[in-house]
Amino acid sequence: MTIRKLASGRWQVDIQPQGRGGRRVRKSFDTKAEGIRWERAQLAAADKGEWVPPQRDKRRLQDLIAEWYKLHGHTLKRGEQRRDYLLSLCELMGNPLANQVTAGFYAEFRQQRLQGDLKTNKRHRGPISANTCNHDLAYLRAVFNELIRLGKWQGDNPLSGVRRLKYDDHELSFLDRTQIEQLLTALKESGSKHAYLVAKICLATGARWSEAQSLRGEQIRNSRITFSGTKSGKVRSIPIGEALEQEIFMERPRTGPLFQYCYKAFTRVLDKCNIELPKGQASHVLRHTFASHFVMRGGNLLTLKEILGHADIKMTMRYAHLSPEHLEDAIAKNPLAELA
């Protein structure tokens, strides 16, 4: 019998219950004591002739994804989208046997994704970023973790030992006052009243574009917007000025959907304004603009966390460097200040 500690901190038992030349079995445990107990039980069963070799799992990765969705994924807010994303990843991987998905197998697949060497489907176009790779890894790990919890996957999560890729964070871009005025004027002149008002709501509340665009009249009362069905699942209520509320309902009923789909109209106007933004930040630039100006004007980070609906303060801390106090401390407390 061989029992060894893995890099993950778990203990792996490697035995041949039927003796040399017999079927080899490996199984991992959280503690060494659990491994020893399991090993003794297997050997005792073999001595009595009652040991049955475990059947090979012939399921493919696609089968695991389907089972994960049936038992758990359908309960997630965006479960159907997650399932479709996972299935398209599975297609790129060649839909391997589930027991062929090892840390090494995935690491090679990831490297091909990073280099853009794979034949991509519509959903995945390479090369991709390290951040996208980390999302892929998290989604696949979650499938195995949930099936293990439900007793539908025997053994360890094969991707538990794969490390996330490190990458440099991109600074969150935001619009200055001149750019805000330029954008709102251009939106107003474009004739898209929906895009213009949705943009103003995002700038006034820090809402995501999708949250503002899907608002119903019932969600705005007493100069306050209540967002529900959000990404985090939290309901949050943000005050707005009376003038904005009156502008929203000037030509709209107090009940039912307020806006049509208008994101493309917004991005077209944004492009015409020649406002340069890092790739991928157009959809959130108004949210970042609200948060950045909030902090620069002395807003409290904990309050901002609640306004934005962040689950973790770490997300909100991305704006901390914009705080006036933060900048003043850099001037007052640097070593040159002592020499002045």
Image (cartoon, rainbow, N blue to C red):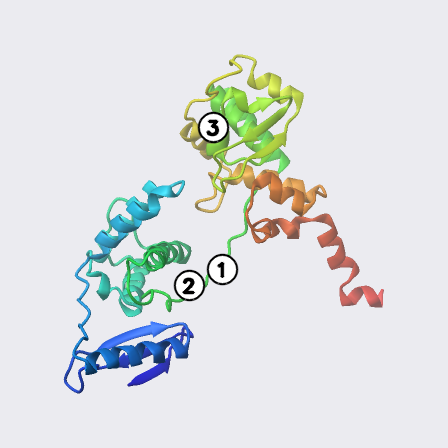
Name which residue type carries label 2.
Arg
Res 168 label? 1
Circle 1: residue type = Asp
Whether residue 135 can be seen here: yes
Which quarter shows the N terminus?
A: bottom left
Left or right: 175 in relation to 333: left
SS type, badge 2: loop
Q: Evaluate whether residue 85 shows in this view.
A: no
In the figure, 146 relative to 23: above or below? above
Residue 234 shows which numbered tag? none
Identify the element where label 1 is drawn.
Answer: loop
Residue wearing tag 3: 213
In the displayed structure image, the side of residue 92 where residue 224 appears, left or right: right
Circles 3 and 1: CB distance less than 8 Å?
no
Looking at this rendering, what residue extends furthest in the left direction? 21
Indicate the quadrant where residue 332 lies: bottom right
The percent position of residue 273, horizontal first and vertical second, equals 50, 33
**Place of residue 141 in the rendered image (x, y in percent of width and height, measured from the top left):** 36, 59
Mark 3 → mark 1, Cα distance in angstroms: 32 Å
Of residues 130 and 55, the one nearer the viewer is: 55
Q: Are marks 2 and 1 in contact (CB under 8 Å)?
A: no
Depth check: 35 or 67 in front? Answer: 35
Residue 317, x across and y down, in percent:
61, 52
Residue under the point 14% across and 85% down: 21
| Placement of 313 over or under 193, stated as above or below | below
Mark 3 is on which residue type?
A: Gln
Residue named by callout 2: 164
Q: Residues within 10 Å of mark 3 (few under 14, many from 20)?
A: many
Q: CA distance from mark 2 to mark 1?
A: 13 Å
Which numbered disc, 2 or 3, marks the residue that appears first in the sequence? Answer: 2
Which residue is rendered at x = 56% and y = 51% of the image? Answer: 312
- Residue closer to the observer: 9 or 52: 52
